Amino acid sequence: MTLQRKTRRMTPRALTLGALAVSGALALTACGSDATSETGTADSAASAQAGAIDCGDAKGQLLADGSSAQKNAIDAWVKQFAAACKGGLQINYKGSGSGAGITAFTQGQVAFAGSDSALKPEEITASKKICKGGQAIDLPMVGGPIAVSYNLPGVDELVLDAPTLAKIFDAKITTWDDAAIKKLNPDAELPSTKIQAFHRSDESGTTDNFTKYLIATAPDDWKYEGGKSWQAKGGQGASGSSGVAQQVKQTEGAIGYMELSYAKDGQTVSIDTGASAPVAATVENASNAIADAKIVGTGKDLALELNYATKADNAYPITLVTYEIVCDKGNKAETLPATKSFLNYIASEDGQALLADAGYAPIPDEIIGKVRETIDGLA
């Protein structure tokens, strides 16, 4: 999609509402997450979720695939949805990666796909063979930080900036006691341990967004074009966000990028953006950055342009927004009721409220309102 499309920047009101959504969500317990709570609270939350879900005529099996970054969120939503909509309805989201999901969608294998990058023009063209009389559109549904997780015993806090990250992931900085890292962390006892950088081996919207950040903020140190496939020559590959997280967890000296929910049990880097203080990878800080996004999609498409170079205080710059990819018109009649019912739920206030507990950022109110309107009009 070209950036010459009509754009509209989100208002301060959207930022406020997004922050309120996050703070409200933090008070809830997601039954599908790893959070623990008293049984009564969990039961109450589950009952409230079930009561808010309109199953409509949803039935049968709903197949979906795509972004592994949003899989933990999808799993939490599916648990609530399946509990409310009984009678044989099954939702199977594979989480094979954004590239695989879009391919499965354009080949007619799934009812919807998840992607951490908006559709490319050629993907929209391909979708018209499946979306009879229409085309695929992007519906932003899940936000959150791409955390840079590391495994360095004895170093509990670590600050990096874009040029240093670019050199680490391009194998130009190879040990943890490098002068550039020391300068950013003067009080840390940095070992001479070899850096083991891990990246996604599969096509990934997480890779696309991570490298877009490096391209926007460290152009002198990151000379690659970007995209869903990893292009730098350094480092080691692992499949899916879970694969990268596992490699970082078990490898001393490791560093890797992943969606925050996969890094919640490990150490994460704070980013020196030029703001008054380094910015941590948190749900709130990601929401602050997402609220500065612009809508660049046209018609019913709601693709966003993120500001990776933000220097605003408390705005974490390495963020992603996961889109649900669906036909605006021409969805299969047998799966349309279940697709609309499930998408309506996950875009609802109750569905979005589950995100923070799972390590994700709710989509700011101004955008998610448009998403709800679009879902209602799917045909």
Image (cartoon, rainbow, N blue to C red):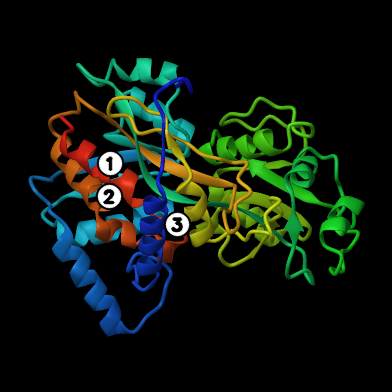
Which element type, helix, strand or loop, lies under badge 1? helix
Which of these two is toward me, 110 or 291?
291
Residue at numbered disc 2 = 347
Q: Which residue is mark 3?
A: 360
**Distance between the Cα atoms at labels 3 and 1?**
18 Å
Tag 1–tag 2 contact (CB < 8 Å): yes
Q: Residue at x 37, y 51 (%)?
A: 14
Give the mark nearer the N terminus: 3 vs 2.
2
Q: Is residue 127 above or below residue 56?
A: above
Label 1 to label 2: alpha-carbon separation: 7 Å
- Amino acid type at circle 2 is Ala
- Badge 3 local density, few (<14 within 10 Å), some, or many (20+)? many
Residue 92 bears which disc, if any?
Answer: none
- Which residue position holds label 1? 371
Q: Position of residue 7 (x, y in %)?
A: 41, 29
Q: Tell us which disc is closer to us: 3 or 1.
A: 1
Residue visible at 41% across and 43% down? 10
Upstream in the sequence, badge 3 or badge 1? 3
Q: Is residue 69 visible?
A: no
Tag 3: residue type? Tyr
Q: Quadrant of residue 185?
A: bottom right
Q: Earlier in the sequence, mark 1 or mark 2?
A: 2
Residue 169 visible, this angle: yes
Residue count near mark 2 (Cα–Cα under 10 Å), binned few <14, some 14–19, many ≥20? many
Q: Are marks 3 and 1 in contact (CB under 8 Å)?
A: no
Locate residue 190, reporting x and y percent. 87, 64
Asked if residue 77 lies left or right of residue 260, the reply is: left
Residue 204 image point, x, y percent: 53, 37
Q: CA distance from mark 3 to mark 2?
A: 14 Å
